[in-house]
Amino acid sequence: MAENVKCKTCGANVPAGMKFCASCGAAVERTEVSAATSKESNSDNNEGGKRRGLNLNKLIIPAVIIIAVLGIAFVSLSLLKPDKYGKIVGKISITNDRENNVVIIYPNGKGKSNIDGECELGQYNFEETKAAFLIREEEGDEGSSLYLVTDEVKLIDDNVHRFSFSASGNAIAYVKNFDSAEKTGELWLYYNNKKDLINEKAEGKPFISPKGSAIGYVAYDGGDKVGYVWDGKEHEIGEDTIPIAVSDGAKYIYYKKTDTLYVQKGTKGDEREKLSEIPLAISLMLNKDLSQVIYSKFDENEGTKSYISRSGGEGEFLSDQMIGRLIIPSGTKRLSCDYDLFTFIDLYPVSDFSDTFGRTTGTSCELYRITQKYDAINIGMDIDTVYSGVFLADDGKTMIYSRDGSVYKINGMEENPNPERIFTGDVLRFLAVSDGSAVFYVKNNNEIYYKKGKDEPTLVSDDQIDENSPKVAQSVLLNGKTLYYAIGNELYFSEGAKGKLVNEFEFDIYGVSIEGGAVIVSTYIDERGYDPNIRSYEQILHHYRSTDGKNFELVEAD
């Protein structure tokens, strides 16, 4: 009769009648045997040996368990792996009804709010879940009202001159009560529903760190202009010094002094690097924690070259061309800041510039991949950017671009990418779906086609746009997949098949755009008549908004 035994694999007690251990799954070996088996064993022993067979269950079951655990871990890591570029998830939008002098704000998925006045300036966080806006009530007012928009609209302060909104959306640095004669005002910080006065003689525009823990600014000390950084305490950086960007905790401070760009580690000034002699205008490309910056340096003999500084270190050579823009997928956001007329700052939602793509500026450009060793490798030349630009898919490696009327696709992460021609001939512009699997394209005769993979192109629209209509971009993608396009006063949509009529408006459509997750249609009334030689006209604009792409509401009239 069978009895309880100990598992030889894990040592657990196994009840009578159980063939496998409940703890580890190994097969159980029992000592009791039948009389026939006993005789066979005795016979084997008499022959001088005991049979020992390989117990496969001992090996297979634990192996299956290990494989299953590893599989679950791999899937979990894949699902939890953060998107390299982040995503826009908010649906905030703001429009001006100038006819009624009203600003119409749609908070994050909430009903609209109306505020008297006109919106002058707006800034978003990376996810577009929060935004800050200046609204001027009457023309000629000295200052504007500063509002914060989340899932509600909140007035922060009045008589505001300029402001800087943190990339995380949790803080605002702003200058109020600005004296235009003295060119100074009060610098305030709004953080966690609390307002604090930072400096009473601040000049110009402040720069707030991504999470709002530090501010860079210029203030007057007596009659001298002095650069400061605030990180809970005010620290002087130096006379005639202009801080233009600062990271959280003031770990990295970027500033201009006597026509030179510097990066400094911390507020003490013990470690600083001279990065570049500043030309007439300077552009900085910063990662999201400001630990890396891409910039250009001009040399009279060698021209303009691109460099990267990491962790406050000296500049490392990137390219003998000026890389002026990082390419990011649609549905992601860069934050731009014109600090002054000659300083332009772009913050990108990446923690590291390695394995990203840059491009030179102009009507045609070259593409570069920044490697893990921080070399810039040329992966494409003479890309047409007038209408289409360069598209990067959600996977962060599939790129689509146009050249000489044809559209190409490459895997930008390959060592020597081989362009695949998707289609050719008279392509004016294209729009690719977010995963890069399909493309809508407009030919020079204004016909619209859809092409997916190796399939033959599908005709979406063969309607002709009036030659005397203004030449504007009249097609957009909603949610990265649905095309909306305009013909005259009619709006159509397509997800790859023949276009279907959505709405017919009273006047011709001037443009179609996407804002705050909604389709925005702008119509116009031509009062003077359009002259194609002058390409200008007097117009009255009406703007309509739809969150479902079907039902439109008039939200603005100019």
Image (spheres, grey):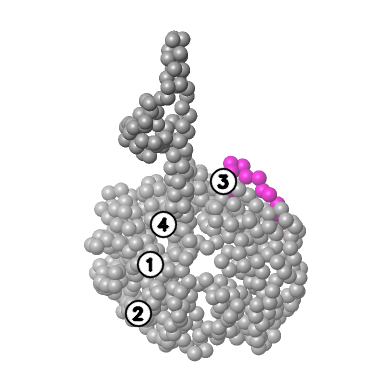
Mark 1 → mark 4, Cα distance in angstroms: 13 Å
Could you say whether the residue bearing mark 1 is in a helix, strand or loop? loop
In magenta stretch: residue 424: no
Q: Nearer the viewer, mark 3 or mark 4?
A: 3
Disc 4 target residue: 288
Quarter where residue 163 is shown:
bottom left
Mark 2 → mark 3, Cα distance in angstroms: 46 Å
Residue pictured at 35% horizontal, 67% vertical: 170
Disc 3 target residue: 413
Q: Are marks 3 and 1 in contact (CB under 8 Å)?
A: no
Q: Earlier in the sequence, mark 1 or mark 4?
A: 1
Judge whether residue 184 can be spotted in this image.
no
Q: Amino acid at mark 1?
A: Gly
Mark 3 → mark 4, Cα distance in angstroms: 22 Å
Magenta segment? 412-423
User: In the rendering, which numbered label is found on residue 155?
Assistant: 2
Could you say whether the residue bearing mark 4 is in a helix, strand or loop? loop
Specify few, some or many for label 2: CA neighbours under 10 Å numbering under 14, 14-19, or 20 or more. Answer: few
Question: At which x and y percent is residue 234?
Answer: 24, 63
Q: Are marks 1 and 2 in contact (CB under 8 Å)?
A: no
Q: Nearer the viewer, mark 1 or mark 4?
A: 1
